[in-house]
Image (spheres, helix red, strand yellow):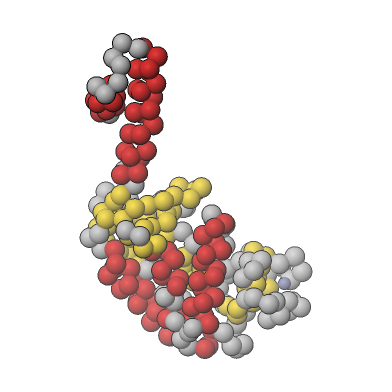
Amino acid sequence: MRRAINGFSRLLLNRSSRGNPIKNHFIYLVSLLVIIPVIALSSDHFKVKRVIDGDTFVLENDERIRLIGVDTPETVHPSKSVEYFGKEASAFTKKFLEGKSVRLEYGQQKKDKYGRILAYVFLDTLFVNAELIKQGYAHAYTKYPFKQEYMDLFRQLEKEARENKRGLWANDSTTTITPKDKYWLNTNSNTLHNSSCKWYGKTKEGYYSNEVLGNDCDICKGAHR
Ligand SMILES: [Zn+2]
């Protein structure tokens, strides 16, 4: 590292005055500023060994990665079509990521309680977290707040996916009231209302859900966690 910086400064020095110590120091500093970001950027690339499911995979170094802000369907959901899309989501992530080199961007919290690294994942210019939501393979998972810019993007993409009935939104059952739908999630405030609440099904943006996906409401106490 130090040798690389020295080499780089020497390269610059060859084209300038050799005798001036202040100038030499300045050039050394400039070299540091150029080389360090290059090294930092390249170290964020990792090879994907194995995909576990739509939102989780393992790197070659055996670290587990969980995509931030994304929740692919699980088999606990009552609707079979959604369960099916859980498998589709895994296949999608597998197709895109397995054996590939990805770039990781981290959130404020480095790992979750399971020891998985929380990350935004990029394959070249493709933002994988966003793509899963956009194509209807995943919900925007905003229970735990993350980078505001990405939260807004994910919510917008989910809205579009629902409106265009992509993937897991293809079946209307998740957007119609059924006795099974315990909660209404206000996707604007990320507040969860239960069926006794005056806001249940009434906010401008939102959807019915059985999953505990938002913050508790002050009036109905949401999911009573
Ligand atoms: Zn409420």
Which residue is rendered at x = 45% and y = 71% of the image? Answer: 133
- Residue 201, percent from left and from top: 68, 81
**Is residue 149 toward the left or the right of residue 6 in the image?**
right
**Is 194 situated above or below 109?**
below
Image point (68%, 77%), residue name: 204
Residue sitting at x 27%, y 48%: 61
Q: Is residue 117 left or right of residue 15?
A: right
**Residue 67, picture quadrant:** bottom left
Q: Quadrant of residue 57?
A: bottom left
Quadrant in which residue 208 is drawn: bottom right
Residue 150 appears at what percent x and percent y? 51, 60
Task: Determine whether 10 is above or below 137 in the image.
Answer: above
Of the 4 image quadrants, the one containing the C terminus is bottom right
Front one among 200 and 223 = 200
Residue 15 point in image, percent of width and height? 26, 24
Residue closest to the far front: 16
For residue 222, say whether it is visible: yes
